[in-house]
Image (cartoon, helix red, strand yellow):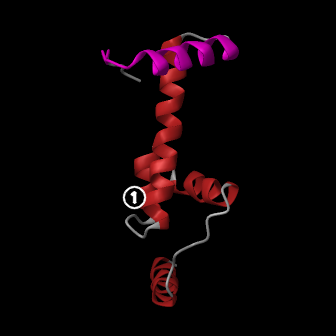
Amino acid sequence: MATKTLSIRIDDNDYKFLSSLAREEKEDVSKAIRELVDLGRVMLAIEKYKKSEASVEKAAHIAGVSISRMMDIFKEYGIEANLEYEDYLEGLKTLRDIW
């Protein structure tokens, strides 16, 4: 995976928090930030899905995971499907068309 370097400005309290978190996890600050970004993407995806602003597919894209992994994440966080009955019927129709 290609990586990019990013320079950001953060206040002292946030830097102290990140440094402390990195020490606790026995990793460098950069890794701690990457892990927080990954977690933030998942949380953003969950929020957008809960507000019906994103489908499962879009939520998975936001989180950077597969659709099946996103569904597992929803289960882990107790997020109920926001499918309407018509969505369910459309899914069945698509499945029948494929088979």
Amino acid bearing label 1: Lys
Q: Say whether residue 50 is left or right of residue 78.
A: left
In the displayed structure image, the side of residue 46 where residue 23 appears, left or right: right
Q: What residue is shown at x 51% (from left), y 84% (from top)?
A: 96
Answer whether residue 18 is magenta in the image.
Answer: yes
Q: Secondary structure at mark 1?
A: helix
Residue 74 point in image, percent of width and height? 61, 59
Residue in the image at 61% along x and 19% along y = 21
Q: Where's the N terminus, which quadrant?
A: top left
Q: Quadrant of residue 79?
A: bottom right
Write down the region rendered in magenta. 5-25
Asked if residue 65 shows in the view, the reply is no
From the top left corner, tell me how far across and down residue 84 is, in percent.
49, 85
- The answer to whether one can see residue 11 in this image is yes
Q: Residues within 10 Å of mark 1 (few under 14, many from 20)?
A: some
Q: Is residue 29 left or right of residue 77?
A: left
- Who is closer to the viewer here, 94 or 2? 2
Which residue corresponds to the image point at 39% horizontal and 19% vertical from the top-left? 11
- For residue 16, above or below residue 67: above
User: Is residue 78 toward the left or the right of residue 89 in the image?
Assistant: right
User: Residue 57 sits in which quadrant?
Assistant: bottom left
How many numbered marks, from 0 up? 1
Residue 9: image quadrant is: top left
Return the x and y of residue 65 as percentages of the image width and height.
Answer: 50, 46
Relative image position of residue 38 (x, y in whole percent): 50, 35
Q: Which residue is mark 1?
A: 58
Q: Nearer the viewer, residue 14 or 49?
A: 14
- Give the main secondary structure, helix, strand or loop, of the magenta stretch: helix
63 is within the stretch colored magenta:
no
